[in-house]
Image: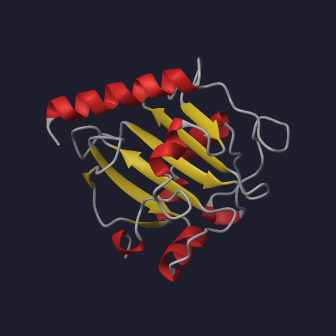
Amino acid sequence: MTHSHLLRSSLALLLLGAACSDNPAVEQPGSDGGTGDLAMTAGSDGGGTDNSAAGLTAFVKAGSYKSWKAEPAIHASTGPHGGNVRTYVNALLYASLKAGNVSHPKGSIVVKELYGSGTTTLTGHAVDIKDEVSGEWVFYEGFAPGYSSPYYFRGTSNFCASCHSPGKDYVLTPASAIP
């Protein structure tokens, strides 16, 4: 991907985000009528935090997902996140991907580390969670250092979901990418 193509893609995503929400950090109501602060999967597989924007920011900053199954190395992104990335999945999603499921269980979590043009400095995270209670997808993308105003959406009527819709149940990472 050329630099100018990457810039055009990034600009298009920013414009789409602006069209979908006046303030991407504003949490969208979940099916529970609240703002989406339902607990994630318990244990080392993502528990102990909530799936609100603030909870996900704390979760990625803590880095506990680093013990999960992951792509072997940082590599160039083939998607809209641009730059270099590395994807981690929790045990629920890993088992589902390896089984070839077309729908993933509630509590499935994907964390994509974003590295920009390098491979040593983490510039942000993208997280997709299938809410453990409602089964609704939650999409989050925040950028270092402060993670202020992250993109945060619940459900599948938003620009994150539109890019992820070709995947198996909104997950684009193939089972073959994670040993």
Q: Position of residue 73 (x, y in %)?
A: 28, 61
Compared across the picture, whether 139 is left or right of 145 comes to right
Measuring 54% from the left and 45% from the top, which residue is drawn there? Answer: 161
Q: Position of residue 22 (x, y in %)?
A: 59, 17
Q: In this view of the protein, which residue sits in the foreground, 129 or 168?
A: 168
46 lies above or below 161: below
Which colour scheme appears in the figure? secondary structure
Residue 58 visible, this angle: no
Compared across the picture, whether 81 is left or right of 105 comes to left
Measuring 30% from the left and 40% from the top, which residue is drawn there? Answer: 82
Residue 118 visible, this angle: yes
104 lies above or below 52: below
Q: Position of residue 153 (x, y in %)?
A: 62, 37
Which quadrant: the N terminus?
Answer: top left
50 lies above or below 99: above
Compared across the picture, whether 118 is left or right of 101 comes to left
Q: Looking at the image, how many numbered discs can be counted on the residues?
A: 0
Q: Residue furthest bottom?
A: 99
Q: Position of residue 92 (x, y in %)?
A: 61, 71
